[in-house]
Structure formats: structure tokens, C-alpha cells
């Protein structure tokens, strides 16, 4: 049976929730919010990957509004969810392709294994269900398996996959795909890229070349560049944003594998540090497990607020 929107996210976040919720439960069994309790709370938040800046701010907020009062763990969770949702609200921007562009060109970038190819497949599936026409580009021409992986999604969704022989220039592939997408009236062109090349400079050159070549045909392309981050890497995701921001103009983030991780708090740290839009979160391997990002729902799910 298909799980509803909320239960799916909740189930996905279960590990993060248990970690935060249990720690708060242990710290706040009806007690006064004093220095020691606040310090314990800060430890819980840092331990849950929210980042030291967020943890300090949340604790300062609690100090100014509730210091010396008796609090229950439920009250703490409620207040915490509200605080976290406030941090997340500005970055929670759902993504809708601009149907007037024909095609809206999306470049998917990120370190290897974060979920770029899977995310492209999930998006193709969702767009198919919405009656949008999608085309995928197997821009990771390094690995044969990468092309096959995309072709599986192509078969599932009926969306054409543009690919070339091994080691084809991905920029040329992207250029040809854009020509074809325009001719065929495609709504969304999803371009996959390699996560790993021999070094950072090579990867940067490759990504920049894809962008340069797309612009020859359409000055405004790519219209979106999504950086895909794997939540299980925790704080390392912050470094990846730094690295990729130097290479290309990231328009938004997608955070995957929240289901396999106790590090859902990383989304809060990302929001605080970069303020980049978070368009989707991945909570599983099925197409339906790529969810738009709702700040209050996420915050309540994360801390285990009822
Ligand atoms: N549990 C879980 N697994 C995911 C999620 N997103 C992707 N995966 C899995 O993560 C693995 C890597 O995903 P890929 O899509 O191949 O990652 P990639 O970024 O394309 O990797 P490279 O092509 O090697 O750069 C696959 O086994 C996916 O099924 C998610 O949200 N949850
Ligand atoms: Mg891939």
C-alpha cells in the first residue's frame, strides 16, 4: 500500500527522529530549564548535525523565553520544531519546471554516489505522471553502468535517453540532446553528469564545458543546476557545497538518503550556512520517495513532535 505523504517522510526520517527525540526525552523529564539543561540540549542538537551555529541560536532563544520555567519534553519538541521550521522556511522552495521554456534544462551535479542518476529517474517518473514530456541525457559517459542505469529509468518512464559510446564528450551529447528536445517539444531536459573524474579541475572543466556549449544554443540554459547531496555524509555535505559553488552556479539543493541516515539535521545546517533553496529530499529508492521539502512537516518529523 502506498504510504501517505507525511508518513512516508516520517518513516524516512525515523532514524534522525529517534536520535533527537530520545535524547530530548532523556534530558527533559519535566525539569526546570536551567543552565545545565540548556547545555544538554545544545549537545543534543550538535550531535544531531544541526551545526553549532544553529544549536547555539536555538538554545539562546530558549534561554530568553523559557529560562527557569518547568518544561516537558513535548513542549521542548514543539518549540524546537517551530525554531527549526523558521530556519528552513526561506530555503524550502519547491521546484516546478517552467513549461514555457520547452525545454527547461536541468543540470544535475554532485559527488559520486550521492544519487544524481536516481534523482533524475525519480523526477522523470513524477513528470510522466503529471503529463510532462521529459528527456534524459546520460552525461556520465565514463561508466557504462551509468548509461544503463539511466536507460532502466527510460524504459520505466518512456522518456527518451540520449547517450553515446563510452567516453563521448558529455558537452557534445548535451548539445545534441538540447537540439532534439527543442525539435520534439520536450518540457524538461534532465542532464546527468559524472560524479568523479581524475581530479577536481577535470570535473570543473567538464561541467563548465557542458554549460558553455548549452549556452551556444540557448543563452538562458541551463535554467537550473541542482547539487545532489547524500545526507549520510553529514557535515561533509557542507564541504561539497563549497567545492561545487566554486565550479558552477548552483541554483538549488537536493538532499538524498535521509531514510538511511540519522543525520537529517544536516538539512538545517545547510539552510543556515548557505541559504540555497532545498527543492527536494530523498527518503527512499522509489520514485515517490523524492519529496518536496515542507519546512514545518520536516521540522516536526525531525524532532519527533507529535
Ligand atoms: N535509501 C536511499 N537510497 C538512495 C536515495 N537516492 C539514491 N539512492 C541510492 O544511492 C545509490 C547511488 O545513487 P546514484 O543515483 O547511482 O548516484 P550518482 O550520484 O548517480 O552516482 P555516480 O553516478 O557514481 O556519480 C543507488 O543505490 C541509489 O538507489 C535515497 O533517497 N534513499
Ligand atoms: Mg550516476
Image (spheres, rainbow, N blue to C red):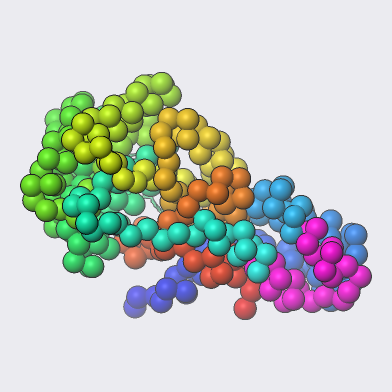
Q: Is residue 29 above or below residue 13?
A: below
Quarter the N terminus occupies: bottom left
Q: Which residue is at the far left?
A: 183
From this view, report whether residue 79 is shown above or below residue 149. below
Q: Which secondary structure is most common in the magenta stretch?
A: helix
Place of residue 164 in the rendered image (x, y in percent of width and height, measured from the top left): 14, 33
Determine which quarter of the picture holds residue 72: bottom right
Residue 248 visible here: yes
Residue 149 visible in the snapshot: no
**Residue 64 part of the magenta segment:** yes
Image quadrant where one finds the C terminus: bottom right
* Residue extent of the magenta highlight: 59-81
Q: Position of residue 244 (x, y in %)?
A: 46, 34
> What is the x, y in percent for residue 111?
42, 37
**Residue at (61% x, 45% y) in the render:** 273
Q: What residue is at 65 percent from the left and 68 percent from the top?
A: 81
**Side of 11 where 206 appears, left or right:** left
Nearer to me, 178 or 14: 178
What is the count of numbered marks? 0
Q: Residue at x 74, y 76 (%)?
A: 75
Give the vertical position of 248 relative to 77 (above or below): above
Instruction: Tell me: 207 left or right of 36.
Output: left
In the rendering, at what x and y percent does residue 133 appear? 17, 58
Q: Nearer the viewer, residue 228 or 99?
A: 99
Q: Is residue 223 magenta?
A: no
Using the image, determine if residue 202 lies above or below residue 78: above
Amino acid at each position: 500500500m502506498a504510504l501517505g505523504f507525511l508518513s512516508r517522510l516520517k518513516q524516512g526520517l525515523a532514524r534522525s527522529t529517534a536520535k533527537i527525540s530520545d535524547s530530548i526525552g532523556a534530558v527533559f523529564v519535566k525539569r526546570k530549564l536551567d543552565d545545565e539543561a540548556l547545555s544538554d540540549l545544545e549537545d543534543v542538537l550538535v550531535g544531531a548535525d544541526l551545526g553549532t551555529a544553529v544549536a547555539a541560536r536555538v538554545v539562546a532563544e530558549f534561554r530568553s523565553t523559557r529560562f527557569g520555567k518547568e518544561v516537558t519534553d513535548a513542549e521542548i519538541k514543539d518549540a524546537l520544531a517551530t525554531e527549526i521550521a523558521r530556519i528552513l522556511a526561506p530555503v524550502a522552495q519547491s521546484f516546478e519546471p517552467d513549461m514555457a521554456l520547452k525545454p527547461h534544462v536541468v543540470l544535475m551535479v554532485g559527488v559520486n554516489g550521492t544519487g544524481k542518476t536516481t534523482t533524475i529517474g525519480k523526477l522523470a517518473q513524477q513528470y510522466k505522471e503529471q503529463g510532462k514530456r521529459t528527456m534524459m541525457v546520460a552525461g556520465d559517459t565514463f561508466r557504462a553502468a551509468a548509461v544503463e542505469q539511466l536507460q532502466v529509468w527510460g524504459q520505466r518512464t518512456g522518456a527518451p535517453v540520449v547517450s553515446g559510446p563510452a567516453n563521448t564528450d558529455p558537452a557534445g551529447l548535451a548539445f545534441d540532446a538540447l537540439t532534439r528536445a527543442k525539435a520534439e517539444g520536450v518540457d524538461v531536459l534532465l542532464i546527468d553528469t559524472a560524479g568523479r573524474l581524475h581530479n577536481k579541475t577535470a570535473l570543473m572543466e567538464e561541467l563548465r564545458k557542458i554549460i558553455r556549449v548549452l549556452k551556444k544554443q540557448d543563452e538562458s540554459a541551463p535554467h537550473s543546476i541542482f547539487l545532489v547531496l547524500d545526507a549520510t555524509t553529514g557535515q561533509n555535505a557542507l564541504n561539497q557545497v563549497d567545492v561545487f559553488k566554486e565550479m558552477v552556479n548552483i541554483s538549488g539543493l537536493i538532499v538524498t538518503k535521509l531514510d538511511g541516515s540519522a543525520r537529517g539535521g544536516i538539512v538545517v545546517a545547510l539552510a543556515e550556512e548557505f541559504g540555497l533553496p532545498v527543492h527536494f529530499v530523498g527518503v527512499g529508492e522509489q520514485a515517490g520517495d523524492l519529496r518536496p521539502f515542507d519546512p514545518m512537516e520536516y521540522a516536526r518529523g525531525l524532532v519527533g513532535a507529535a
